[in-house]
Image (tube, helix red, strand yellow):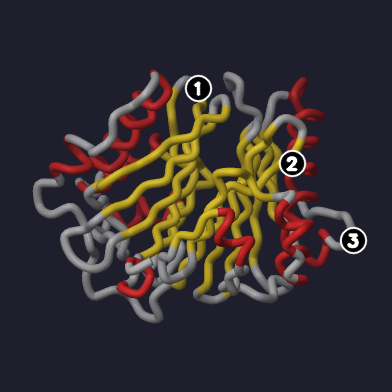
Amino acid sequence: MPMTGVYRAIFSYNPRMIKRGAWAHVAIVFLAAAAPAAFGQYTDMMQADMAFQQAIAKADKSALEKLLDADFTWTSAGGRVQNRAQVLRELPMPAITDAKNAEAKAYTYGDLGDVQLNLGRAHVLRVWVKRSTDWKAIAWQELISLETPPSFTPGAGKDCENPCKTIAFTPKNDTERQVATAYSKLETAAHARNSAAFGPMVGDEFVAASSNSDKLQSKRSRMADFDRSKDGGVAPTPLESARMLAFGDAVLMVSEHRPDRGSPLHVTRIWVRRDGNWVETLSYQTAVTGAASAH
């Protein structure tokens, strides 16, 4: 598969195996010549993630401080966003306190990567960036799925002016312009429930997790919902603000949204350039409750 500047290693791991220094590989996709480098990126990130989990479990702030990026944020299941200093001052309680039975997946895209944990209705995303020679945690986001299928889907209204036609974001460079264009194109396809247009805009490993849905959605399930004229609790929502951080051919996008009804949303996305096009690999959407929005 031709790729420009992005080498991706796709794995799934069992936390109990990590403690023994072993990983269960689901798939590895990269250029043959780049295999050692891509695998090295993955293993280095996973070692940092293991140290991160141990620091959280032991409430070891000294160890944790060394693993957190200057831009690190922790988003609770209630939508409260805390910065690095706040987290180090008082460690939040994770939504998943014992990950030994959790489903876990990890992905690397050059100097950007993520780890996903799912246990029952609890879903946790950890995003990692490589700074110089070390991997640093830049985002922790969690959410709790609904117990039952949603009775309605908060969205962008009938016309989807924002984010389908215009968005409240001013790109600072060409990469941000390209990602912003891809984002609007993706949301236009989702609003129209056009699976044929949506498919090429997301990676095969795509996952959507939302406080407004009762299930994780994959690329396949999302497209199947569209074909049945359903949203499953996930729909385009008006963008209020966003920031993008580029790491080569991968971009971390963090944004705030206010749907036509229901609670505001704090959303984390990862975009990767493949074959010259930007595709979304994940979207984690946490509803900001009244208590969280007061902070």
| Mark 1: few/some/many CA within 10 Å (<14, 14-19, 20+) | few
> As shown in the figure, which amino acid type bears the numbered disc 1?
Asp
Is 198 situated above or below 18?
Answer: above
Please say if the residues under marks 3 and 2 sit with CB atoms less than 8 Å apart: no
Q: Residue at x 59, y 62 (%)?
A: 87
Residue receiving disc 2: 42
Q: Residue 219: where, in percent of width, then height?
A: 44, 49
Q: Residue 69: where, in percent of width, then height?
A: 63, 45
251 horizontally vs 157: left or right = right
Residue receiving disc 1: 275
User: Number of callouts in the render?
Assistant: 3
Q: CA distance from mark 2 to mark 1?
A: 22 Å
Q: CA distance from mark 1 to mark 3?
A: 37 Å
Please say if the residues under marks 1 and 3 sit with CB atoms less than 8 Å apart: no
Q: Residue at x 55, y 44 (%)?
A: 71
Residue receiving disc 3: 20
Q: Residue at x 44, y 55 (%)?
A: 284
> As shown in the figure, which amino acid type bears the numbered disc 3?
Arg
Q: Residue 245: where, in percent of width, then height?
A: 49, 34
Residue in the foreground of this view, choosing between 160 and 65: 65
Give the quarter of the image for residue 81. Answer: bottom left
In terms of secondary structure, where does tag 3 sit? loop
**Which numbered disc, 2 or 1, marks the residue that appears first in the sequence?**
2
> As shown in the figure, which amino acid type bears the numbered disc 2?
Tyr
Q: Residue 218: where, in percent of width, then height?
A: 46, 54
Give the quarter of the image for residue 78. Answer: bottom left
